[in-house]
Amino acid sequence: MAEVLVYVDHVDGAVRKPTLELLTLARRIGEPVAVALGAGAADTAGVLAEHGAVKVLTHDAAEYAEYLVVPKVDALQAAVEAVSPAAVLVSSSTEGKEIAARLALRIGSGLITDAVDLEASEEGPVATQSVFAASFSTKSRVTKGTPVITVKPNSAAVEPAPAADAVEQLAVSFSAQATGTKITGRTARESTGRPELTEAAIVVSGGRGVNGAENFALIEALADLLGAAVGASRAAVDAGWYPHTQQVGQTGKSVSPQLYIANGISGAIQHRAGMQTSKTIVAVNKDAEAPIFDLVDYGVVGDLFAVVPQLTEEIKTRKG
């Protein structure tokens, strides 16, 4: 069976959930070979093997921490040359998509971004994408070179599949461009204790109907009970009620959680484009004609200031 390269997104050896999802998808089209770079790369081997990586290629160098993107592209190019994989899978983060695009250009291959599913075929991996604000699904296949595919978080359930714990050092020669953009400083993002928006299995969002920054406390209380991330519509963000980093939509972040709860969100096409691939969608809106009700699995026509507190209390009761 052909090997499939999976780029590992980790922080000092702690592997992030989207990488484990990639390993699940990679097993559908071949044997996963993980590529872990930077500080703590060797520490990722155990969890990667537990989730199906038949081999882990590691490399650590100061360049990965000191310079932007290009050193990682150099390393992935070296991995492609060493393995000759059937495909390269990268998570669809902002950095991931830039790495994937640069790699595809380097190796003269086609690129598919924001896939939500993968399947094998005799001609090569076939990727499913959600397009035109999630109104249609398409199936695409790269016809030239080694397919480079980025996959949206939450596109697949994490499935453990223990494999051999084989670790190899990857030989990497950095290009002249690797040191072209230096990182001059870092500021730690303030932690809310909630999951990352694009990776969360549950997202609770608020829109114009929340009617003020102070009322987002209702949204946060529900989210915290569910272990969810908090999102916001463009209207709420533009009004200054919630940070831009939490905006869901075409000009914000795209999410695809198992459960999406929209509160006081009308469902404009701009917002739908960022959340319509959610597995189960629930909406609370007092306007029975709101467009959001056209795509929900469950809809509640009612005032969120009455519905959300009742829902929160009911969840507290059931949790005991």
Image (tube, helix red, strand yellow):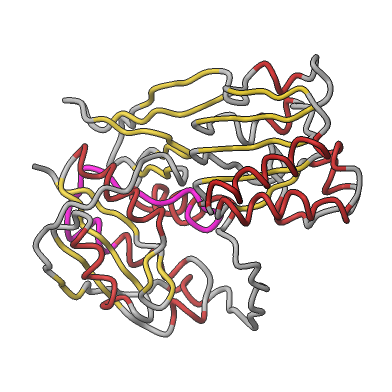
Left or right, 161 with respect to 264, comes to: left
Please provide percent x and percent y for residue 304: 80, 36
Q: Is residue 259 left or right of residue 117?
A: right
Q: Quadrant of the N terminus?
A: top left
Where 256 falls versus 129 (above or below)?
Answer: below
Quarter residue 301 falls in: top right
Q: Magenta span has 190?
A: no
What's the residue at 47%, 39% (across, down)? 113
Instruction: Identify which residue is drawn at 41% across, 53% down.
Output: 18
Corner quadrant of residue 115: top left
Instruction: Name the quadrant containing residue 148.
Output: top left
Q: Residue at x 62, y 22 (%)?
A: 296
Task: Using residue 26 as the reference point, say whether residue 269 is left or right of it.
Answer: right
- Whether residue 7 is situated above or below residue 248 in the rendered picture: below
Residue 213 is left or right of residue 259, and the answer is right
Q: Nearer the viewer, residue 129 or 267?
A: 267
Q: Which residues are magenta?
A: 78-96
Residue 95 shown in magenta? yes
| Residue 237 on image: x %, y % | 82, 49
Residue at (91, 43) in percent of width and height: 211
- Name the spot of residue 136 as percent of width and height, x first: 53, 18
Q: Nearer the viewer, residue 226 or 272?
A: 226
- Image position, residue 306 (x, y; %): 81, 37
Q: Residue 92 versus residue 103: which sits nearer the camera?
A: 92
Q: How many marks?
A: 0
